[in-house]
Amino acid sequence: MAERIIKIGTRDSELALWQAHHVEKMLNDLGYKTKIVAVKSQGDIILDKPLYELGITGIFTKTLDIAMINGDIDIAVHSMKDVPTALPQGIVQAAVLERANEKDILVYNNNLDFLTKEATVATGSLRRQAQWLHKYPKHTVIDLRGNVNTRMQKLKDNNWNGAVFAAAGLERINLKPENYINLDWMIPAPAQGAMMVVAMGNDTYSLNALTELNHIETEITTYIERQFLRTLEGGCTAPIGAFAKFNEKDETIHFQGVLFSIDGKEKIEVNKIIEVQEWKQLGYNSAQEIFENGGVQLMQSIKEKLKK
């Protein structure tokens, strides 16, 4: 094995560092030498504005993209749902790791009695906000920013009834409390629960190393979900959910995709079951179905609301 050290770039939050060390261990086990390089992203620094006001696309990945293009790092590890569907020129998706828990969960204060009356629930995600208000129209949803540690602390410090989190993030750093429930009815963000590793397209050494980490099933299902997102032109700003899953018994893929209005009152959903070999256009075709059922007008109204 060559002596080159692969520099692994990551955000400096506890979760991001956990993910980087997870990739580091996998590469070390294969005989590669590595070094962790942590940097702070704008998404971690600016905590007083909702994500969609920051021109969200790439807010958590841009700093690492620049570091990679400058040669300060060789690869970067991301929560895949944070990665824009269009990568910067020269940077490529090098590996998708096996998906963890894709679900959203509600972490609550005190008890769950509030579900049947007026309440306040926190989330920084338009997708979670829209789905929550669709199910609980009498509730108030307030913005919650910061890394998972910060958000958990804010929940403890405030008199909110609860807050919505991605299960995978809390599980990875052992922060998932006893006072939670799975939100089985909430369709996750495209690629939620998966980790993506990117590298420069001309860095053959790193690309060869990362190929060995790629999980093909997760790569395909997240491709479908992100294709759906990209076709709807949602970036990270529109309330879009998508989840694709293999059914090994009959070799099919089950896909759920949804577009909501920001206030949760409008919902356009698509459900499909297809043969595995037809997966390449599933996300695109599902998005077209959304468009045909009122999605063009709904996306336009979302964009107009976010401009204000």
Image: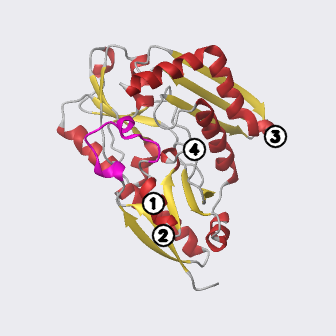
3D distance between C-alphas at marks 1 and 2: 8 Å
Kindly report the distance in space between the C-alpha atoms of the residues bearing marks 3 and 4. 23 Å
In which quadrant will I find the N terminus?
bottom right
Whether residue 21 is visible to the viewer of this picture, yes or no, is no
Disc 1 marks which residue? Answer: 64
Residues shaded magenta: 42-58
Label 1 amino acid?
Leu
Instruction: Residue type at mark 4: give it.
Output: Thr
Q: Which is in the foreground here, disc 3 or disc 4?
A: 4
The amino acid type found where label 2 is placed reads Ile
Mark 3 and mark 4 residues within 8 Å of each other at the beta carbon: no
Label 4 close to label 2 by CB (< 8 Å): no
Q: Which mark is residue 201?
A: none
**Whole-number angstrom distance, CA of label 1 to CA of label 3:** 35 Å
- Residue at 67 percent across and 70 percent down: it is 208
Question: Which-is-in-front pick, marks 1 and 3?
Answer: 1
Q: Which residue is mark 2?
A: 73
**Classed neighbour count for the residue bearing mark 3: other residues with Cα under 10 Å, few (<14), some (14–19), many (≥20):** few
- Secondary structure beneath label 4: loop
Does residue 73 appear left or right of residue 51 in this picture? right
Please name the residue shown 21% across and 40% down the image.
156
Circle 2 residues within 10 Å: few <14, some 14–19, many ≥20? many
Give the amino acid at mark 3.
Gln
Nearer mark to the viewer, of 2 and 3: 2
21 vs 193: above or below: below
- Foreground of the two, 38 or 66: 66
